Every structure is written in structure tokens, then in C-alpha cells.
Amino acid sequence: MSFRNFLERLEGDRERELAAALALLSLNGIGPSRLKRWTTRVGQLSALWCGDRPARMKGWPQGGEVDMEVTKKIQHELEFIHKFQLGFCMWGEADYPQRLKNCPDAPYILFFKGREKLEHERHVAVVGTRNASEKARRFTLELIAGLAPYRPLIVSGLALGIDTAAHRAALDVGLPTAAVVGHGLDRIYPAANRDLAAEIVKQGYLLTEFPSGTLPDKQNFPRRNRIVAGLADAVVVVETSEEGGAMITAQMALTYQKEVFSVPGRPWEIQARGCNILIKNRTAELLTGPEDLIQALNWDTLFFKSTTDRQNHHLSLSPEEQEVVSLLGQCSPCHLEELGQRTHLSPASLASALLSLEINGIIRALPGRQYELA
């Protein structure tokens, strides 16, 4: 069966377009940029396989036909998407992430799995070394807990170290998180993060440009990093050496006109040298806590400016916030340590709930690490 016949037998228009795009990307010399130009010109890539249209397209490779082996791979990919209920979107479609679409080297196809939409009001990428220090992990947790009231999507790359800490912190404080991977969605790399990936799917999504069967080869990770940078409004580099992959993500973010922040480290610490270089070269803003990012992105001007707003917000408290308010209604003021013991919330979840409630004027902090209802 020829590829054209295979294409004609597909029933759904989106399946047909995906198959056409995968077929074109399999041909020598055709990449995402050319597909974007052709999409703009003809509207539907599947139209390029009708009649003699391919011969008339500028840049079509000589003898550019799809063989039976590639056709079988495309058929397998469509079956894989159906079997595991994956999502996909293509450049030019309404659900393709706008932040990424604006990047000149954005992938043409994205595959994803999860329960969250790809676009949120605020996106922050948190990246760093795989060999993260304990203090860097703690800082990542505190940073994301501090950002939690503003409900950003936390983007990272599912690697060990800072990436893992960022995804875990987002899950702990109830934030959506996106893990961009450098392989197909038929596997998880590293294998140690398989359980974490399963949790991410329930509270965010896994995302890749690679079809099933793609191995986590070394050359795929810079491509993964450009998607991390492209999806973000701001990129935070927590800890990295001067040759770490996070440096690539930071440089790509700068080319995309994104905000880049770097956490300073001690000069003699190898895993902090990259962060210090970014600050020294003035390619990144120094970041010492969540308030630096909140102020730089003007998030602090967006919250509940009137008493009416605060009262209405009571109706949409998270379960963690409701638990804190309920406890303070029984004993107020209450010490932070007692709140932690009586609510059974994790330190990150409790910190996020307290900060959100304080910002919204529902509680107030007192000297001695005590809190009361406002």
C-alpha cells in the first residue's frame, strides 16, 4: 500500500494532517521551518500528497516519496496515540502553545499526555544541574512554594537534580507542572523518575516533539531545552556548572527574549559557577527568593485590590487554605509549628497556603511566627 493510499484511508482530518506531517519530516532536507512555510501557503499538508502537487512545491526533495517502512511507522504512531490516549498538536493549530509558536525554531508537532491544558496565564521554567546540592534543592522548594499563590505552570525537563526538585515542589504545593522530555512517550528517562512522571500526568503533562520509539540520545536534550525555554515567561537557573545543560536553556531563553534569573552561589562551588557567570555577564538577573521574580514580572499588582475581591475569594480557597482557616478559627493566634502538627500538611504546602491567605488579607502574620485570622 502506498503512502497516498494509506493517507486516503484515514478518516479524521487531524489524523490525516499528522500523518502527512510525519511523512514529510521523514524526507531528507525537510524540517519544521519548511513545513511551517508550506502550511502557511497551502493550509493542509495532506494536500501536498494529492496529484502532482509535490512536484510543484519549492524545496521538495528529488524522488521524495515515502516508502512502506515509513508508512508502517506512521501507522504504528497513530495506533500508539489512540491506545495510550495521547494528545498532539501541530504548528498553526489553536491549541499549539502561543509562547512556543513565537520561537523561530519551534517544533512542528508536539505530543503530550496529561490532564492540564498546555497554556496557562503564567509559565516559569526552573532548571539546573543533575548533581544538585541539598541547599539548592531546598531553595527550589522554597522558591516554588513562594510562587504558588500566583498559580504559575512550572516547566522543567524531568532530569535528576533540580528538575526533579522543581516538579516535586510543584506537585507538593498543588501547582500544574510540565515535564519536557527528550524521547518518545513510550518510555521515561531517567527510569528513577517513572513514578514522578505518573504523578505529573495527573497534575500537569508530559511533552515531547519526538514520536514513540525515539531513544533518549544525547543530541535530543538541547532540542528538549529549547522547548523548556520557549514555553516559559521566565527561566530560573538554580544551580549549574559553566558547561551544564541549564546554560544552554538560559542562552536559548535569551534569544527568545525571555526573562532569565540566576541564583548566586559561592565562587569555589563548581556546580554554582554557571549561575555566577550568568550574573557576572549580566545575561541573567540575580535571584535570591520568589519576591525577586514576582516583582520583576509585576505579578504583585494582580491580586485582590478591594475588600469585595477578598470576600469573593473566600469562596475559592484550596483545600489546604480551607484547613488552615478552619484551624485558625478554633485557635487564633496559632504558632507555625502547631499549625504544621495539627494540619498534617507538608512544610511546602503549609508555607504556600499561609502566603496565599496572607496576601489575600484572610490571615495576618504576628511576631514570633504566629498567625491569626484578619
Image (cartoon, rainbow, N blue to C red):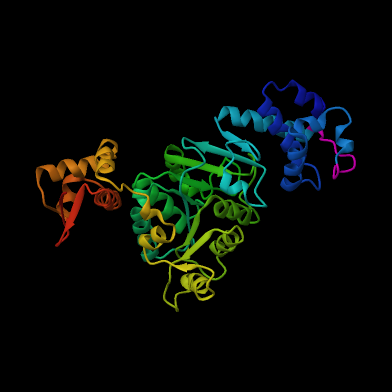
Question: What residue lies at 51% left-to-right and 62% top-to-bottom?
Answer: 260
Quarter-wise, where is residue 5 in the image? top right
Displayed quadrant of residue 23: top right
The reply, left or right, for residue 150 in relation to residue 354 is right
Q: Is residue 198 left or right of residue 217?
A: left
Q: Is residue 2 left or right of residue 157?
A: right
Examine the rendering and report whether any part of residue 161 can be seen: no
The outermost residue toward the bottom is 268
Q: Nearer the viewer, residue 206 or 264?
A: 264
Main secondary structure along the magenta-highlighted residues: loop
x 55%, y 39%: residue: 112
Number of marks present in the image shown: 0
Q: State the image coordinates of residue 135 (x, y, percent, origin top left).
A: 36, 65
Find the magenta span and give its range: 58-68
Determine whether 327 is above or below 371 in the image.
Answer: above
How far across and how far down the image is residue 339, in percent?
17, 50
- Residue 193 falls inside the magenta stretch: no
Q: Residue at x 14, y 45 (%)?
A: 328
For the N terminus, give its image quadrant: top right
**Can you tell which quarter of the image residue 44 is in?**
top right
| Nearest to the observer: residue 40 or residue 263 | 40
The verdict on residue 59 being magenta is yes
Vertical side of 160 occupied by 268: above or below: below
Residue 243 appears at what percent x and percent y? 57, 69
Q: Is residue 118 visible?
A: yes
Query: What percent of the width, then of the height, locates residue 343?
Result: 19, 45
